[in-house]
Amino acid sequence: MITAVIAVRAGSTRVKNKNTRPFAGTNLLVHKIRQLQKVDEIDDIVVTSDSDAMLEMGRENGTLIFKRGPEYCDEKTKSMGEVIAHVCENISGETIVWAPCTMPLIEPFVYKDAIDTYFQKISMGHDSLFTAEEFRRFLWDENGPLNYEPGVKQVPSQQLKPLYNSVGGIFIAPRVEMIKWRYYFGPHPYMYLLDKYSCVDIDDETDLIYANILYDMHHKDDC
């Protein structure tokens, strides 16, 4: 049994009321619910929050709900690991798919493929799956360049060794293992690469505007 989890909270520091901001004719939370409902591999969807309003949105749109206490939502009292374990201890399902609503451009077919890939990789020795974005950039820290030589020896960016940014779009693992690890993935995860479109993550107002534009362009023929 596969359970998808959408974890949202009332407080948001960078984008006010971020999880319920308008998107795709509804809001980010309901949009994510509708995306996941198109994934046949998912048996249940759980919205977990400290917000009664967001829990009601989940209930009205056919999801299960789990209300978290404020200490599991303030990002101060409890660690991320404690929050992950707490949620997993209070829901059912053999396999958990974490699916934050702040990455609204991950389409249903991507979830389907990620789930299929997860089960393939489990049989090959991996214990979990997380999403990442490949990038090639000229990186510096306070001491200078990290991955290239400026000047005559500088190579084009496409010749740089690829690096990977872990993005929180999809995490898949056994529920009991998430409780044990107190994390989204284990010591032997499979890195599932997302394309640039899917990787848009809403951290600020600019991201939200950008995501809306991209979504409308991508779905202009749906109407």
Image (cartoon, rainbow, N blue to C red):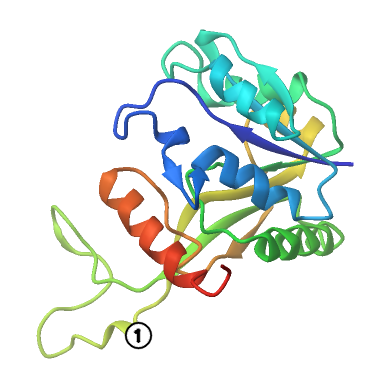
Q: Nearer the viewer, residue 201 or 179?
A: 201
Residue 48's spot in the image, x, y percent?
63, 24
Indicate the quadrant where residue 124 lies: bottom right
Q: Is residue 201 above or below residue 66?
A: below
The answer to whether one can see residue 187 in this image is no
Viewer can see residue 223: yes
Q: Residue furthest left?
A: 151
Residue ranking furthest to the right: 1
Image coordinates of residue 56 in percent, x first then y, are: 63, 22
Q: Is 171 drawn above or below residue 6 in the view shown? A: below
**Residue lying furthest bottom in this view?**
152
* The quadrant where residue 194 appears: bottom right
Q: Is residue 210 above or below residue 184?
A: below
Report the residue marked by disc 1. 158
Q: Out of 45 and 183, give the one closest to the viewer.
A: 45
State the image coordinates of residue 172 (x, y, percent, origin top left). 71, 47
> Is 13 situated left or right of 95 in this image?
left
Name which residue lies at 39% across and 56% down. 212
Amino acid type indicated by mark 1: Gln
Looking at the picture, tell me which residue is in the foreground, 48 or 87: 48
Q: Residue at point 49% right, 23% down?
A: 9
The reply, left or right, for residue 34 in relation to residue 126 is left
Residue at the (76%, 57%) spot, across then down: 115
> Could you tell me which residue is drawn at 41 percent across and 38 percent down?
21
